[in-house]
Image: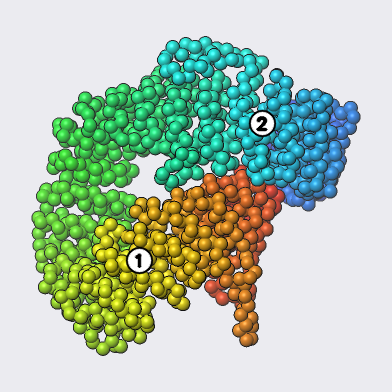
Amino acid sequence: MANLTLTGILEKMTGKDKDYRYMATSDLLNELNKEGFKLDVDLEAKLSNIVIQQLDDAAGDVSGLAVKCLAPLVKKIHEQQVLEMTNKLCDKLLNGKEQNRDIASIALKTIVAEVPSSAVAKSVLVSISPKLIRGITLQGMGTEIKCECLDILCDVLHKYGNLMASDHEVLLGSLLPQLNTNQASVRKKAVSCIASLASSLSDDLLAKATVEVVQLLKNKSTKSEITRTNIQMIGALSRAVGYRFGPHLGDTVPILINYCNNASENDEELREYSLQALESFLLRCPRDISSYCDQILHLTLEFLSHDPNFTDNMEEDTDDESYAEEEDDESANEYTDDEDVSWKVRRAAAKCLAALIVSRPEMLSRLYNEACPKLIDRFKEREENVKMDVFNTFIELLRQTGNVTKGQTDFDESSPRYLLKQEVPKIVRSVNKQLREKSIKTKVGAFSVLKELVVVLPDCLADHIGSLTPGIEKALCDKSSTSNLKIEALVFTRLVLASHAPSVFHPYIKAISAPIISAVGERYYKVTAEALRDYGFDFKPFVHPIYTAIMSRLTNQDQDQEVKECAISCMGLVVSTFGDHLGGELPTCLPVLVDRMGNEITRLTAVKAFAVIAASPLHLDLSCVLEHVISELTAFLRKANRALRQATLGTLNTLIVGYGDKIGSAAYEVIVVELSTLISDSDLHMAALALELCCTLMADSRSGPNVGLTVRNKVLPQALTLIRSSLLQGQALLALQNFFGALVYSANTSFDVLLDSLLSTAKPSSQAGGVAKQALFSIAQCVAVLCLAAGDQKCSSTVNMLTDILKADSSTNSAKQHLSLLCLGEIGRRKDLSSHDHIENIVIESFQSPFEEIKSAASYALGNIAVGNLPKYLPFILDKIDNQQKKQYLLLHSLKEVIVRQSVDKAEFDDSSVEKITNLLFNHCESEEEGVRNVVAECLGKIALIEPGKLVPALKERTSNPAAFTRATVVIAVKYSIVERQEKIDEILYPEISSFLMLIKDNDRHVRRAAVLALSTAAHNKPNLIKGLLPELLPLLYDQTVIKKELIRTVDLGPFKHTVDDGLELRKAAFECVDTLLDSCLDQVNPSSFIVPYLLSGLDDHYDVKMPCHLILSKLADKCPSAVLAVLDSLVDPLQKTINFRPKQDAVKQEVDRNEDMIRSALRAIASLNRISGGDCSHKFKNLMNEIAKSARLSEKYSSIRNE
């Protein structure tokens, strides 16, 4: 059927009437695009010929449609037919009439783009390559033909370069001479053609091409336009092949720098191309370019102000803040010269400098000294496009500063942040001039610089608000300002307001607030509330204008959702801050807010706004809406939207605290019933909020007896289920403890019933099985809170009951004993139990128990009881540690409980007991058991926080102890003493830390690993402690990542041998340490020297080592993409090996699961590599991505990872 239709169409296509031909061709296109379209062999030939004929149709729209028909046609016909078509088209291109050349060229490009398979592509290439080469190289060919051929060849090479490996040499031989022809258009196309070819060339041919170009550049007699082309060629090559160009930098960089400096006065393009090539080197060959960075820096700084035709007569009076300058400025800007292209050089220099900033974090401090003043000075650039690039380069400098110094608090003189702070006055002066310019684009650029500055140094503008105000005003009030500029100015204002102390703004509030209030007509007015948050000045004149502006927005229904939400939250702020001045307006605006609670889109924002109003110190009168609000909120607790439930619980809590007397206890009961359903371990945060609200309700003296009853019936059962959860911790656990404490006080709930129900939750139930260990701790804490709340008499009767359980026969009921011990510990920590005789001996009896968990519970209990009365129980514990060898480990755990529970400032130890404890701990440093050594180290570390003056020297002294275990223990102790908070130990440890960390070169592997772990903790918690040591430590750390043959031993197990790698833990720790250093000390780590060879060997190591290596690779791909690109090829093999690894047939489930995790982890790293721009230079990586895409198993995992 289709064939009949086609025959009809084909007849019409050859008709005389051009409209008929047009319609018929259009029908043919529709037919070809149908899914099930099939052709027989005769029709194929006929159809192909007619379409080729149509290309020459005199009517342009017909030939245009014919080209469109080629795309689907190529996919539907046989290879032979495709070849015939391409041959005809090539013939037309080379020998046909001029008017048909364009269309033939477009047709060929279409076919190349649409060829269905690489097999067909190969035969097409074999047939057209020689013809295209002939078109390019034959003497006497017209320039246009050459250009068309180069264009098509460029497409062919880009898509199928690697299929043509055998022709590469011929192609290169015919393309390179084209760089010397006299026609500029041919040279330009040849450059892009060679670049397309380069990405698939072998290293030898790439070297050959580069050497030829370099020879041409060295030849002084070459014409300057040809030299320009060759410089462009170098830049294009480096962009195409990326880091593979590294080995040739030694030949090329000096030549380029030389050309920049010595080019003739008016040869600006030569300089521009040279700088562009250098920019490409910086980004793509970071390792090989490092030795030239200094020269390039000086070069870019010199050309940043390269402006030979214009002398700037205002260089002298930059410090003069007078407005007299403005007139000069205008007259200076009137200078124009259409011939002058020196701006291109300045732009290229700015971009090259940006590349240097981005790719060299380690040069930051130098860049501040040398480049920063120059950049700030160049804000006055007269060519707008260049000015934007100067702004962008400066923004890159600020961002890099932010990246490198993230998380650092104190600055020394050489830290980039400190240096930036010194430059702030200059920056503000320079930017202020730009804000006075006429151009909108300039002002937007200037604001983005200021914005980035506030992000990196939050409080740096405090002294400059006054000088910036006129610029902000002008941007907001000027008639010519676009909304884009206004939004930039407002966002900047908001950032400044949020990051500086309010008092800074008081003098300028009048100037800033007027334009902002008028801008409420547009978009952001979060700003106003921010600005007027503080009462240090007379704010009355501003209240009503602000209120009116927001009210008009609030009542307006047809507007953007973002504006609605801002209006609601802003009104909440205004009412809570100035409600007492708005007495008359409250009855009109509060109902509007209640109304917004009924609307699904705005209800969440409205709930939050009410929380703000209810928490206001002005205690406003809300009686007009209170009842309505409470009933709405109670209903929201049933909604599915989690954020809404969360906000509702918070708002209800605030309302009940502030306005409980206005809400009846009937409403309370309803709330209790609703909230009881939210208490479960599926959402602990919600459970905590619900329990807090419940406590607020019970604590309110006005709640009637019914409320307590409802709580007991509805909430208590939920709470008793929650307490058995092994997930319970943090805020939710605290809330649960308070809940039990509050229940004792509330009417009609007896202590004994509560205690029984709590203790019985620990009984293993028939459905749920035993109780989780974590749950026992939770129950014990709640029991302790309950006892203390109930008073001394109840408390001591409970303690007696618990000790009776312990005295009973221990072998029968271990769960009961376990819980009793934990309860005693929790009660003992909160209350002195010395009135109960011999309680310590009763507890210590349990050390004999056959069950491990009872032993550890007993040591926990003993330690915590000791906290309640140190003078009595601490000597008892110390004495036992010395005398009872068998129970040492448990007793040390008790001691650890005592030490950890001491707060650093108010420790209750006297000097003699510190002395005793430390001597005792140091005696146990060499214990054979690792468990004992770890507890000793933790105890030492925590005591060091309390008494650093005594302990740091004592620890240091033992770093040279002959026993390796002692050396390792003291280093781990230091690790425990480096905590995130600022502590008094810091300044004592700072000068001494190197003697601990330098044990990384110890000859015992345990000590080396201890040092690596300590370095890791320091890098995470206190990077400034170790910054100065890194140049010395890093090479030693990298050395720990290498597989050491001498640490691998074979254990003979009789029937088979088993290999044990003792160095594995150390390597894993070392890589994890590097991972931490990348977060906190990026400017110290030189990524290029680490990736190869260390990371590379890690990617091919054991499972435990590969995992952290994949994480490191992902981080590096984000933070130092250029260093990763430089060695991308070598990274592909280990990753490929990992994702293609299949476990053995008889592997156990655990091994299979581990391997799955491994593959996912490798794919995550590959996904990060794929995000780097420029990764397509590496053929190996491209092939890896194709392989993943083709494999169903991998591509599914890969796409799920990308969507994470």
Which residue is at 30% across, 59% downward? 904
Which residue is at 72% across, 40% downward? 249
**Left or right relative to 1194: residue 553:** left
Position in image of residue 941 (x %, y %): 38, 63
Which residue is at 41% across, 45% downward? 409
Q: Secondary structure at mark 2?
A: helix
Position in image of residue 786 (x %, y %): 18, 68
Position in image of residue 781 (x %, y %): 25, 68
Residue 727 badge: 1
Query: From the viewer's perspective, is residue 506 above or below residue 358?
Result: above
Query: Which numbered disc, 2 or 1, marks the residue that appears first in the sequence?
Result: 2
Query: From the viewer's perspective, is residue 896 above or below residue 214?
Result: below
Q: Amino acid at mark 2?
A: Leu
Q: Decide: few, some or many residues near mark 2? Use Cα within 10 Å; few <14, some 14-19, many ≥20.
A: many
Q: Which residue is mark 2?
A: 275
Residue 12 badge: none
Gap between marks 2 and 1 measured at Cα: 60 Å
**Left or right relative to 112: residue 1070:** left
Q: Decide: few, some or many residues near mark 1? Use Cα within 10 Å; few <14, some 14-19, many ≥20.
A: some
In which quadrant of the rendered view does residue 838 lie? Answer: bottom left
Position in image of residue 535 (x %, y %): 22, 33
Outermost residue to the right: 139
Can residue 553 be seen in the rendering of this structure?
no
Q: Nearer the viewer, residue 964 or 831?
A: 964
**Left or right relative to 598: residue 117:** right
**Left or right relative to 603: residue 1026:** right
Q: Amino acid at mark 1?
A: Leu
